Image (cartoon, grey):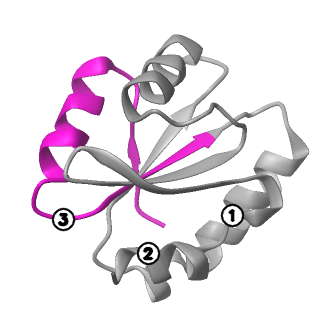
Amino acid sequence: MNWQSLSSEGDFEQILQSSQSRTQAIFKHSTRCGISAMAKYRVEGDWGKKNPDTPIYLLDLIQHRDLSDLIAQRLEVHHESPQLILVRNGKAIFNSSHISISSSSAAKHIQK
């Protein structure tokens, strides 16, 4: 799995910029949560098969809660943990949380 790091406001701005030409994915992950670990494991299992052309960024919520709050505010998405957010043209086009997170459901929105 080719996770890209999301750890600064600059990283987030780059995601917004890149989303103008291609959908970007953000996975908000809590290293202290078993459900988050399970969701991350499921995404790692088939993201490359289902969404090979979509970059996915990993945000550690424990270390970067302030950044998570900024993302929720800017994308107008209620904060959840774990959470998968798809960004296109600088806006959230899809988000899911907890056991609803899957590479397949993301793929349906990426292909639109």
Residue range of the region highlighted in magenta in the rendering: 1-28
Given the image, on which type of amino acid does mark 3 rest?
A: Arg
Residue 95 point in image, percent of width and height: 56, 54
Q: Disc 3 vs disc 1: Cβ atoms closer than 8 Å?
A: no
Residue shown at the point (53%, 37%) measured from the top left: 77
- Between 6 and 20, the one nearer to me in the picture: 20
Gap between marks 3 and 2 measured at Cα: 12 Å
Residue shown at the point (83%, 30%) measured from the top left: 32
Q: Disc 3 vs disc 2: Cβ atoms closer than 8 Å?
A: no
Residue 22 image label: 3
Q: Report whether 50 appears left or right of 37.
A: left
Circle nearer the viewer, 3 or 2? 2
Residue 67 point in image, percent of width and height: 46, 18
Q: Quick check: 26 above or below 23? A: above
Given the image, on which type of amino acid does mark 1 rest?
A: Ile
- Residue beneath label 2, please? 109
Q: Residues within 10 Å of mark 3 (few under 14, many from 20)?
A: some
- Residue beneath label 1, please? 101
Q: Quick check: 105 above or below 43? A: below
- Between 12 and 40, the one nearer to me in the picture: 12
Numbered disc 1: secondary structure: loop
